[in-house]
Image (cartoon, grey):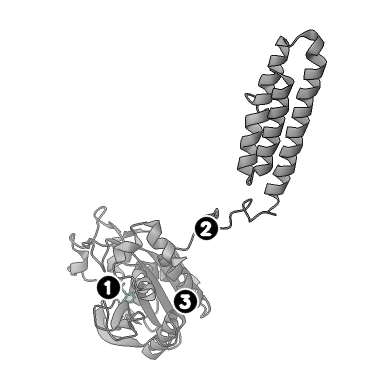
Amino acid sequence: MTLEEIAAAKAAATAEISAAKTPAEVENARIKYVGRNGLLPAMMKGLRDVAPADKPAFGQALNALRTAVEAALEERKAATAGGTGPCEAFDFSMPGNWRGTGSIHPVSEVIEETTRIFAQLGFTVEDGPDIETEFNNFDALNTAKHHPSRDERDTFWLGPELLLRTQTSPVQIRAMLARKPPVRIINPGRCYRRDTTDATHAANFHQIEGLYVDVKPVSLADLKSTLSHFARKMMGDSVNVRFRPHFFPFTEPSVEVDFSCHVCKGKGCAVCKQSGWIEVMGAGIVDTRVFEKVGYDPECFGYAFGMGVERIAMIKHGVTDLRLLYANDLRYLREFL
Ligand code: PHE
């Protein structure tokens, strides 16, 4: 090692550092010259072999090299990091770090919104168990002993008189057994049927039951106006509602209620199977035989309805296959964010 070599190293190092354009280049130069295995520490080690008389001169030269390199590094570090250059310090095109936020599942959303709409009309939320008695699910709902819905092929029986409820209607019975009229309840819950799963059926689905019983007259017109109000709040003012005569053992008269398809506005599409309508619920005037079963005065008046939550979620969001709602594919569910 000679004094000339030290001077040459100083010139080369300061020139290289001054030419650095990014913080990464400055860091590379730092490692190369003053890093642990860099040039300067190597030269410091070389000081051992220098003749004692020359040591002060070499020591001074090496210190000058260190000071010059450190000053140059400081200067370039500040210049490249501050964003004074052409934005090398901050890359605006880098993808951000997004925090994952959850979203409400469409089925939960329909349940929450329905509950809110009916709460404004004075309905309170009632709860009931998924495992029900045969009495609550069938007998008290005036369903004949031989009715096909009791069949083993349709109902999940857990024992001779115990089953997974096939509808939320047993909650009507629970509510009436628990209190006297007026009763105004809404009950969202899971239901179970031995249905083969396809685009519009599932063995496990959700219903929202509604029941209004009073000692003063309650008519089919009240039911229709309440459900029409609900349809508009839920789907928007452009929705049309259609009531078709039907049969349920626990209501008389009974209706099935269709909403015009929200996706095609009634023109016909894949969601509504080209009909322009989607069946969303069953409803009717409570049969006096149900009042008798729960010990109510058969002179009471009431209406009841039970709607399919998945059906409403499907028309609201244009879902053509109900199975998509339960596949738990986050790429799909995120579309509802
Ligand atoms: N429980 C009926 C069903 O599942 C729907 C319904 C509820 C009908 C209340 C009338 C009154 O199909």
Seen from the viewer's position, the closer of residues 297 and 177 is 177
Where is 9 relative to 321, above or below?
above
**Which residue is located at x 65 percent, y 43 percent?**
19
- Crowd around label 2: few <14 · some 14–19 · many ≥20 (10 Å): few
Which mark's residue is nearer the viewer, 3 or 1? 3
Please say whether residue 306 is visible from this viewpoint. Answer: yes
Q: Earlier in the sequence, mark 3 or mark 2?
A: 2
Residue 334: image quadrant is bottom left
Residue receiving disc 3: 184
Q: Is residue 255 above or below residue 78?
A: below
Q: Are marks 2 and 1 in contact (CB under 8 Å)?
A: no
Amino acid tagged 2? Thr
Q: Which residue is mark 2?
A: 101
Instruction: Say whether residue 262 is left or right of residue 59.
Output: left
- Residue position marked by numbered label 1 in the rendering: 142
Residue at 61%, 41% in the rendered image: 25
Label 3 to label 2, Cα distance in Å? 36 Å
Instruction: Give SS at disc 3.
Output: strand
Q: Is residue 32 left or right of residue 149?
A: right
Q: CA distance from mark 2 to mark 1?
A: 47 Å
Q: Residue at x 61, y 42 (%)?
A: 24
Amino acid type, callout 1:
Asn
Viewer can see residue 191? no
Residue 31, image x, y percentages: 63, 31
- The quarter of the picture showing ligand 1: bottom left
Q: Amino acid at mark 3?
A: Arg
The image quadrant of residue 196 is bottom left
Q: Residues within 10 Å of mark 3 (few under 14, many from 20)?
A: many
Which one is nearer the viewer's eye here, 246 or 36? 36
Secondary structure found at label 1: loop
